[in-house]
Amino acid sequence: MTTFVPPEIDWLALAPLLVVLGAGVVGILVEAFVPARARRTTQIVLTLAALAGGFAVVAVLWPQIVAQPVQVLGGSVTLTPFALGTQGLVAALAFLGVLVVADRTSTGQDAFAPSASAVPGTSYEDLARRSGLEQTEIYPLLLFAAGGMMLFASTDDLIVMFIALEVLSLPLYVLCATARRRRLLSQEAAAKYFLLGAFASALFIFGVALIYGFAGTVRLLVIAQRVQQGGLPLEGMTVLLVAGVLLVTVGLLFKVGAVPFHAWTPDVYTGAPTPITGFMAACTKVAAVAALVVVLYRITIGVGAVSPETMQQLQAVIVVVAVLTMAVGTVVGSVQSDVKRLLAYSSIAHAGFLLVGVAGFRPEVQASTLFYLLAYGVATIGAFGVVTLVRERRVGATSGEDNGPVEDDGVVLGEATEIAQWAGLGRKAPWLTAAFALFLLSMAGIPLTAGFIAKFGAFSGATNGGLWWLAVLGVLASVVAVAFYLRLLVVMVFRRADDETVPERVPDAEDLGEGAGASGAPAGVGTATLVTPQVTASQQVAVTVVRSRGPAAVAIAVCAVVTVILGVFPSPVLGLVEQASKFVP
Amino acid sequence: MFPWLTVLVAWPLVGAAVVGLSALVRRRTGPAGGGTGLARPLALVFSLVEVGLLVGAFLAFDTGAAAEHQLAEQHAWIPQIGASYAVGVDGVGLLLVALSVVLVPLVLLAAWREQGRDEVRLRRFVALVLLLEAFMVAVFSARDVFLFYVLFEAMLIPAYFLIGGFGQGAGRRRAAVKFLMFSLGGGLIMLAAVIALYFLAVDAGVDPRQAFLVGQLTAVDLGTVAERLMFVGFFIAFAIKAPMVPVHSWLPDVAGNATPGTSTLLICVLDKVGTFGMLTLCLPLFPEASRWAAPFVIALAVVSVLYGAIMAIMQTDLLRLVGWTSVSHFGFIILGIFTFTPLGTAGSSFMMLNHGLATGALFLVAGFLVSRHPERSQKIAAYSGLRSVTPVLAGTFLVAGLATLSLPGLATFVSEIMVLIGAFGGSPAGSAAWAIAAIPGVVLAAVYVLLTYQKIFTGAPAAGLEALPDLRVRERVVAAPLVAGLLVLGLVPSLALTYVDAPAEQSVAAVTAVDEPADAAAQMGSDK
């Protein structure tokens, strides 16, 4: 007769997860019980408070965990400094992301469909729109996704990791389908993401099964320990282990968005509501890269000690993926004509740069990976935040949108994502353009922005691991990447908008008529520019910048400030992430 | 001790911020639109106070120990990656800081009416110029490789916006992008070398929290192959910046499309970072590799001298011509640096200053000329016979031109002759032969300057140009200090040479002394 022994649980160590996931549950109750009028406000406050609370708990836990990492629930939650750092990072970035999500802008509408389940183009959709419905479920969904991300890298148990993967993925699949505009595109993106994501999950869990077949356990540290002590002979069984680890890695690389598992990224990033894209691009990448680092390094401890050649094979895979990812991300990115797609390829390229650092396989430099994720995350959320504010505005009174008759027949339409439409943005909204330029420069890795220190860290990691040629390749890829960020920058800052030429040129032409005799200037000059409108998409619509109602502006400003501070005085944050470069308790 | 250099860096930054914020002041108090606002006067005041600060720095500098890096400050910046905020100047650095600081108010004054009445553009222009000034001062004072690299790259951004946003030419956007891609490409190659340098230094036992200090790195023996690779990484970046054939092609485009003020800052100051980097980083950090590469570098330098001069003769665009003359002059500077003789190196250092004054004067005066043309044509053929119409302008142009062709009595003559004599006795193989080969460059310089002068200023005035106004007071104020500087330094070159001689000797000693003491001694002997 055995007595029931309740497990000892270090509740404090679980607190960040509990706060965020618990708030998600409360959010669902809010959906049920709070009247519709107050629901949105309640949800936003709750969500932001939960994420801020999660971050605060992380901060409180930090010194304790740095001194003494803990394992809770038999390793289901393994709180190393690296894991805790990831949790804090996800909470902080999710907070900024939710700010962008919450902004209704001066149009009074957020980016989400009034009723996402309504079939596009039906009368039900129209009804939902007219009656002013709102899909406030997105906030609990965001919290669940964030909670899953926080758990993802904080576990030693591959099954728990799988559950975290699903907890973070399923809400994202749903969120992708909720765009207010271009709904078919949005739903298509969600379907694509879901199918490919399910496929990746299947590979992941199959890999876990193989690893279990090899080791008889799904706990990474236990595997490492046993292999190291010779309890698990590698001869003859290597295939099982390597195949298992590779399948798990593939599942993670899919989430990272690395080539050749990147195909979903451009479509999903384009189709999803832009605030969600920003959230997804920043936070998912943090979680996925962190989880990849955790898996690879814990495997390394055991296998690397016993069988270096197996390690080298594993490293070779990561190196090849890194090179491919950088190449495809930068080269294909440089021919994009859509801002969101461009940022999607930029995100792929950054996955490549991150993998360059990871491929060094040196635990002590993995701190730089966290820094990279922070730098990339703030720039990405900021950049997508700016995208949400650049809109199309209908010129002249035509009726109806692609999706049938509309109630929001007003002036401002969806986002203007064609790069050509961004011409002259520097004049329309100088501060917004400056912020966006800053994010682009940071992503390009220009010194005195966060991106430079981050890239420096990643390339140092590779060099330190003996892969200096990989660092050189990374540098070359950076040059290509600079070229495509620059293209966007040139359009925004130096080129005049086509619709801008109309009001500006007309008085010019009049001046010309009045003063033609006096100045003797050739009369064709003014008219020639009038007659050659070169853009197709923006003929019926002009491009306008809507005002943020506050939250998005705050998010963009915070991202910009953080980008500069991390570029100029990265020392304190580097000190923190240095403490976080500890993967095993 | 008063932190002169930090203040010199910080003051223009404050200026840029104040100018940027002056927009808010105007919007509240003044009427919207109309008027030219506070931006220009504010920026000018800031840049003039900066000149005052520079005088203070000169007084604090001990010329007796010009080879040492003085006014030094050092603070931990990013200890995790070994970067420090370390600044300090030797004589050469101080002169180049002075060049930057002196040229900025002149450029602001020269561009006083350039941007029309567009308040926003004007404010951005002067703010960017002040920002660039801060970066330029900082980069010439940096004594930490990481800090140097960061500034080297970061100052491309204001330069990029200055070229792309304010030029006169239609191709200015292309020119800006070309400039940035060339520079960043070179810079990123250098980045790879910088990272490698860090790890090698740490392996060699340098404190990893201060591993980028130049003073520490010079003592590290890197191993032949690594040293050569890193030299190449640094050198490509500097050669692009300098610019040197065959990576020069961005320069004429920029010169033809940017405003003359921008070109002045860019080519007369910013590009000196390339040659300055060769002198203060490549030689001391990679002495063995510098000797190894010297014959090749010298050959390319002489090719630059001749090719730049020939291309200058063939130009039809006045500003592009001035750009090409710089390619030729940078060839001379690089030639002097890689002769490894105290005379040649001192000549190069002096020439960096002189080229800034002479070419700056040429760019600005050419800009004044172009601004007078009814169609703002930059074509040389659009002008003729202006000597009688605008005598002062013609005279100023001639002096600047003569300085460019190194007429005896002007400062440029002294430096060029020093470089050539240095090259004759230079230690790298074939140095003397290359020196002889470079001499036609001097003759070609006379051709492109005098031919241009003849076409523009002699003969009968072209139709429509008979009533052009001569230089205004503002424009004379701009030209006078440059012309005066060229004359004074030509007659009393020791004023500048006291600052460059000792550093030159030291850098030559650093290159020749390492590894091959016997060989080096023999070289020293042959110099005498």
Image (cartoon, coloured by chain):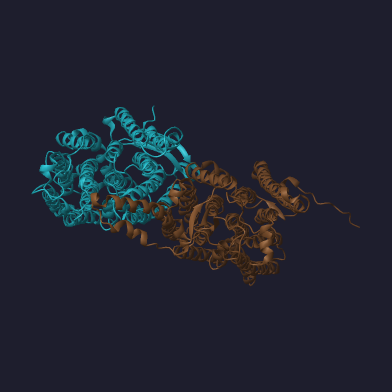
Task: Give x and y (percent) for residue B25.
Answer: 44, 34
Toward the viewer: B2 or B471? Answer: B471
> Residue placed farthest to the left in the image?
B459
Which lettered chain is shown in cyan?
B
Toward the viewer: A415 or B244? Answer: A415
Where's the N terminus of chain B, which quadrant?
Answer: top left
Is residue A496 shown to the viewer in this render? no
> Residue placed farthest to the right in the image?
A1
Q: Quadrant of residue A413?
A: bottom right
Toward the viewer: B209 or B371? Answer: B371
Q: Is residue B156 above or below residue A484?
A: above
Toward the viewer: B524 or B47? Answer: B47
Task: Give x and y (percent) for residue A381.
Answer: 56, 52
Query: Is residue A55 found left or right of B79 in the rendered image?
Result: right
Task: Give x and y (percent) for residue A469.
Answer: 44, 60
Where's the C terminus of chain B, which quadrant?
Answer: top left
Total marks in image: 0
Task: Give x and y (percent) for residue A426.
Answer: 43, 50
Which lettered chain is shown in brown?
A
Is residue A136 shown to the viewer in this render? yes
